[in-house]
Amino acid sequence: MQIAILGAGAMGSLFGGLLAEAGHDVTLLDIDEAHLAAIRQNGLRLSTDAGERVVRQLTVLRPESASAAADLLIVFTKTLHTAAALEAARAALGPQTALLSLQNGLGNAERLVRFAEPARVMVGVTTWPADKSEPGRVSSHGSGAIRLMSADGSRTPVLAQTVDALNSAGLACTADPDVWAAIWEKAAFNAALNSLCAVTQCTVGELTNTPDGEALALKIAGEAVAVARALGIEANDAHVAANVRHALAHHRAHRPSMLQDVLAGRRTEIEAINGAVVEAAREAGLAVPYTESLLHLVRLVDARPR
Ligand code: NAD
């Protein structure tokens, strides 16, 4: 497939590199000049459990310089940059181009259907991790998977092609009609741990330094699951609570992306996570006081002068 990756940071570069290695024609679209220049000069340095290597067969452009319509465009900017990135990359969007978002948070389908009809928009979740340590260098260790579906639930040929392409790159992808539950469960997990770590600057494990930390995390996650269920989405409270407890016990040194954004002086994805849960709760007539408090606290952190 001709695949464009819009937002080629940690995740976009990982996916782009693996898809290029699998023989797809991949263009990375990003605005980070240092990262683009490093890949143009030296190739993409990729470190995974399969080893360290350099991926050279990548086209690297700014979004506004894209000239050819892709078969598939995967959006991997942070959620707050999706719309601006897609506006700039309009030349990569032809009448047949399918769009895929595996970004965190809620509302990704709604952001993408402004640029393509729902049958050509796919959304999902991925558990693959990725880090960008320096321009041109990305790593991902451990295993992961992808669950995705068309935004309108239809099983289109491009959905099957996308699943095949991602599997050809070893990314363990399945088409899953229950993807909305998975998206909400991940949002619930992130609404709890990302926002708490962003505000407190604790690592995940440090949230257990007082007995209240775990209880607070579980309350926030539980609020998001209750909203999903009020909307008819079968998110599973016990499943999310188990994931939160597992992270608190086993991912103790992890700094969630929202904390990394705060420490780096970047705006966070709080609006697509806690913000979207609060908005959906309002529509469902539910109160989500813990989630809403964290939303306002992270907004204050985001509003600090940089
Ligand atoms: P990142 O910050 O490493 O990459 C985002 C990239 O988008 C950057 O390279 C940035 O320059 C680029 N960008 C910003 N504005 C742009 C624009 N207007 N046009 C083109 N490019 C633009 O972020 P990431 O960690 O790769 O995360 C991407 C998404 O995937 C997020 O929604 C995140 O929550 C989600 N996610 C991340 C991980 C992870 O382990 N990193 C795992 C699962 C999901």
Image (spheres, grey):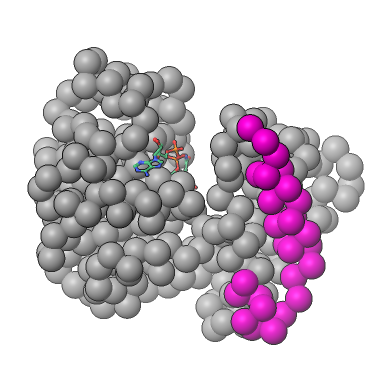
Can you say whether 88 is above or below 274 in the image?
A: above
Magenta part mainly helix, strand or loop?
helix
Q: Quadrant of residue 101?
A: bottom left
Q: Quadrant of residue 261?
A: top right
What percent of the width, then of the height, locates residue 1? 11, 49
Which residue corresponds to the image point at 54% horizontal and 66% vertical from the top-left? Answer: 184
Can you say whether 148 is above or below 27 in the image?
A: below
Q: Is residue 95 visible?
A: yes
Can you say which quadrant of the picture contains the C terminus? Answer: top right
What percent of the width, then of the height, locates residue 110? 41, 69
Foreground pick, 247 / 12: 12
**Residue furthest to the right:** 211
Which residue corresponds to the image point at 74% horizontal and 35% vertical from the top-left? Answer: 201
What percent of the width, then of the height, locates residue 251? 64, 37
Which residue corresponds to the image point at 22% horizontal and 16% vertical from the top-left? Answer: 41
Which residue corresponds to the image point at 12% horizontal and 40% vertical from the top-left? Answer: 25
Q: Is residue 246 visible?
A: no
Q: Quadrant of residue 275?
A: bottom right
What percent of the width, then of the height, locates residue 74? 29, 51
For the record, the magenta segment spans: 279-306
Residue 207 is covered by the magenta coloring: no
- Position of 220 with respect to 70 (left or right) is right
Residue 300 is covered by the magenta coloring: yes
* Count of number-bearing discs: 0
Quadrant of the picture in which ligand 1 is shown = top left
**Residue furthest to the top:** 42
Foreground pick, 50 / 299: 299
- Position of 252 with respect to 280 (left or right) is right
- Position of 264 with respect to 134 (left or right) is right
Foreground pick, 147 / 60: 60
